[in-house]
Amino acid sequence: MTQLKDARSGVVTPEMVKVAEYEQVNVDWLREQMACGRVVIPANRRHARLVPCGIGEGLQVKVNSNIGTSSDRAIPEEELEKLRVSIEAGADTVMDLSTGEDIDGSRKSILAESTVAIGTVPIYQAIVETVEEKGALIYLDSDKIFEVIEKQARDGVDFITVHCGLTSAALELLKNQGRITNIVSRGGSFLATWMLHHGRENPFYAEYDRLLEIAEKYDVTLSLGDGLRPGCLADATDRAQIHELMTLGDLTRRAWEKDVQVMIEGPGHVPLDQIETNIILQKKMCNHAPFYVLGPLVTDIAAGYDHVACAIGGALAGAAGADYLCYVTPAEHLCLPSVSDVREGVVVTKIAAHAADIAKGNKPAIERDRQMAVARRNLDWETQMKLAIDPKKARGYREQNPPEEDDVCTMCGKYCAIKQVKEYFRN
């Protein structure tokens, strides 16, 4: 049984109960949202420590953190620290994108420690092992891909990114129209290289039923990847991107027919004025399946500050209907992020998600801001620290620059506006 099959059968699972309690929604409403594919709960039955999280329409916008080793830097202990920092900073899910040494070991240690849903991109491991064993990625075969997928599912991975919509037809569109950045998805580039070399269709697309069989067996949620996402503003919302999205809509329907949960991944680099259009297109073409966006980044020139560009786009995307934001760190486009980069990325993306929740009328989000306003009126600094998205940083600023009077801050000191009029506005 999968969460989707249970929902369709009228069964309320323990995972649904926990998500409904956290979201402060009616559990029967939640089950109905899941039954029609608008909400997913990524929850592999083999992930022992998992605290389930709901993603989709009517729920709070969620945030994902990416961690994982690379071929240039593979320190498993460092990635575990990034996991801990991600969860502490408020990440709702974490993806292990490891391509360094001992990918299996890294994944298993992350799964053993994580209380949040863990995602992977299985094509990474399939390619790395193929290159190590045979010398080049062109020697990859579909059996290797699905062997890796089943191994990761068996280990307890809750959701996987699979670039099923990157078809030969989509590549032909891309080639004919031209792009500045061509393909920036690592998984997409691996598959495109293999497809163009062999003149064959994408194995994820050609053998989609094989993928669904594994996903249904372990209740692994499919995150249908955007292998042709735009890598710069000039490439946004082009024919190749939309062709892939249309294909993902059809694949979503096929997954639901097999009781497999689905999310759709989206861009990428998108100008502010095109973000809402991208959300509308995805919701329409994919029957309101949860939408998972990378950023989107609203400018290409924010190197070192791409997490800020991401938060701007993420807030607008979330307010327009995106359900799930993948963070970007200050190191994006430059290097493997450090532990502090990961923390910064999670926090700014949580701010974007919270701002989107307020815009969408989410009651818990609105109430949290109301409580902060009351705490500020009352000069209640301890409550302000607790309500802050990053209490650690907020407290650090206050402690490193203490005021002469405990009830104010050093910005205004004894001339604090709230303190001046407090006795005249008692309420």
Image (tube, rainbow, N blue to C red):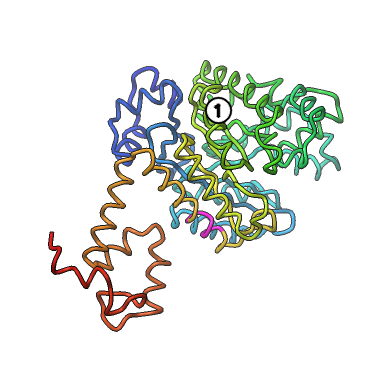
Structural crowding at the residue carrying mark 1, measured as other residues with C-alpha within 10 Å and reported as few (<14), some (14–19) or many (≥20):
many
* Left or right for 140, reference 109: right
Find residue 196 and report its horizontal and vertical position in percent. Answer: 84, 29
Q: How many numbered marks have been drawn onto this rendered protein structure?
A: 1
* Residue 334 included in the magenta stretch of the image: no
Q: Amino acid at mark 1?
A: Gln
Give the residue at x 44% y 57%.
Answer: 88
**What segment carries the magenta color?**
342-347
Q: Tell me where residue 174 appears, x and y as whole percent.
A: 77, 30
Residue 125 showing in the rendered view: no
Q: Is residue 248 above or below residue 405?
A: above
User: Is 220 displayed left or right of 225 in the figure?
Assistant: left
Q: Nearer the viewer, residue 410 or 28?
A: 410
Residue 202 % position (x, y):
74, 26
Q: Determine which quarter of the picture holds residue 270.
A: top right
Q: Nearer the viewer, residue 244 or 366?
A: 366
Question: Which residue appears at 27% of the width and 79% of the height?
Answer: 414
Give the residue pinned by disc 1.
Answer: 282
As drawn, 119 above or below 342: above
Q: Is residue 343 magenta?
A: yes
Please identify the dominant SS of the magenta region.
helix
**Where is the N terminus found, in terms of image quarters?**
top left
Q: Is residue 61 visible?
A: yes
Residue for point 79% across, 29% down: 177
